[in-house]
Amino acid sequence: MHDAKDYLILSNLKIHTELGELQKANLIVTDKTIHAILPQKEFDQFPNANIIEFPEDYHLVPGFIDLHVHGANGSDVMDANQEALINISQTLAKEGTTSFLATTMTAGEKDIEKALLSVREVMEKSENDLGAKLLGVHLEGPFLSPEKVGAQRADKIMAPNIAYIEKWQTQSNHAIKLITLAPELPNSLELIQFLKQKNIIASVGHTNATFSETCAAIDAGCSHVTHLFNAMRGIHQREPGVVTAALLSDQVYVELILDGIHLHPSIVQMILKLKGREKIILVTDAMRAKCLRDGVYDLGGQSVTVKHNIATLQDGTLAGSVLKMNSALKNILQFTNCDLSDAIKMTSENPARALGIFSQTGSIAINKTADLVVLDPDLNVQLTLCRGRIVYESQA
């Protein structure tokens, strides 16, 4: 018999495990990990466990991992303070996100460094928050194309330079995990090769690169594409561009913003048909207005108007989103013919694999970290566990 005081049992659920779906099953959590998965309610060996029973049509899925999120609930990564990051972390947990990369903007060198230092400070705390785990930084810029700057600041774009990355990695205690860059810029290929050596994901994005330039970047080590189709050269029959190179490469993951605004559903269907479920990663690219009402907000020093869930600059350029990860999950199911197991790969397993942390998280399996989400039949979040701790429980 186990000492049961520290056991949590999530009971009577459709559990979406690595090996398939179990009906009316039960999952045992202890010491931040998944201890056991039981087909029947055989709880005698855990006499004092905390048991939470759910309706049998509720789902238990692995926690979502958002590799591209700038902010939420009034806070932004570029606010460069611990309070903002903790607010973002706690807010993301409410949508089922259990891990995330704090995503920066193109900004002055000192502003980027302040943001990196705040991430380091939060990551060095033992539990670092009471919400989604901060895994590190997605450095979106400043090595971007002025022709495809999107909602980034063109006046703060910098030329690719390995020295900056070395300095920023030292300052942040190696918090940078992913860097978006334009591969057509001078010195980009050398930087991509350097990033590969340092086990940092090099991602093609905010770029006007040609097909051949993008293929060269992939050959040099780029394994990721930032919000495919958005802020990049599109498809032309005589110049296939970034998008075609990304779609044809078997080794490249592609981020998709599935808010129904950034990508038409038919484009999403095409991407799924060409890339398959193994190489798509759903992200939010959300900014500080997520979870707040319509209004005018700051994004990297620029004013963004949010109206009817669409975030734009004054000239109409899309400026991130207010998308939630569980809504992205719903949308991929609505836009395509994929099933929930496919969608879970795109929200959880694929980002974990991309980051090299799939042995610890990203799926439901015994001895993995208990990063878990309970969804109702409409895929609304009912409960979120981060590292075995309940960090969100719906009051509905």
Image: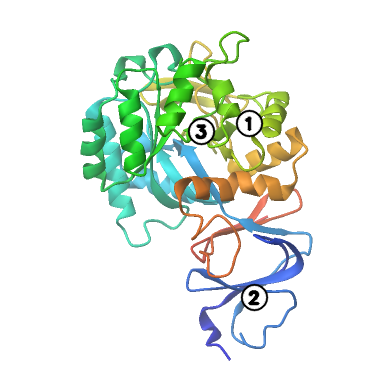
Which x, y percent locates residue 67? 48, 41
Colouring of the image? rainbow
* Left or right of 373 on screen, residue 174: left
Q: Do the residues under discs 1 and 3 have CB atoms within 8 angstroms?
A: no
Per the model, the C-alpha gap separating discs 3 and 2 is: 36 Å
Which x, y percent locates residue 269? 72, 30
Mark 1 or 2, nearer chain start? 2
Q: Taking the image as drawn, is residue 72 in sight?
A: no
Vertical relation: 39 (above or below) 181 = below
Vertical relation: 282 (above or below) 40 = above
Tag 2 residue: 51
Front position among marks 3 and 2: 3
Residue at the (52%, 20%) spot, across then down = 242
Tag 1 residue: 259
Which x, y percent locates residue 247? 60, 28
> As rendered, which of 307 and 110 lies closer to the eye?
110
- Amino acid type indicated by mark 3: Asp
Front position among marks 1 and 2: 1
- Amino acid type indicated by mark 1: Asp
Quadrant of the rendered structure where residue 142 is?
top left
Q: Do the residues under discs 3 and 2 have CB atoms within 8 angstroms?
A: no
Tag 3 residue: 285
Mark 1 or 3, nearer chain start? 1
Residue at the (53%, 29%) spot, across then down = 227
Q: Quadrant of the N terminus?
A: bottom right
Residue at the (56%, 31%) spot, across then down = 249
Per the model, the C-alpha gap separating discs 1 and 2 is: 36 Å
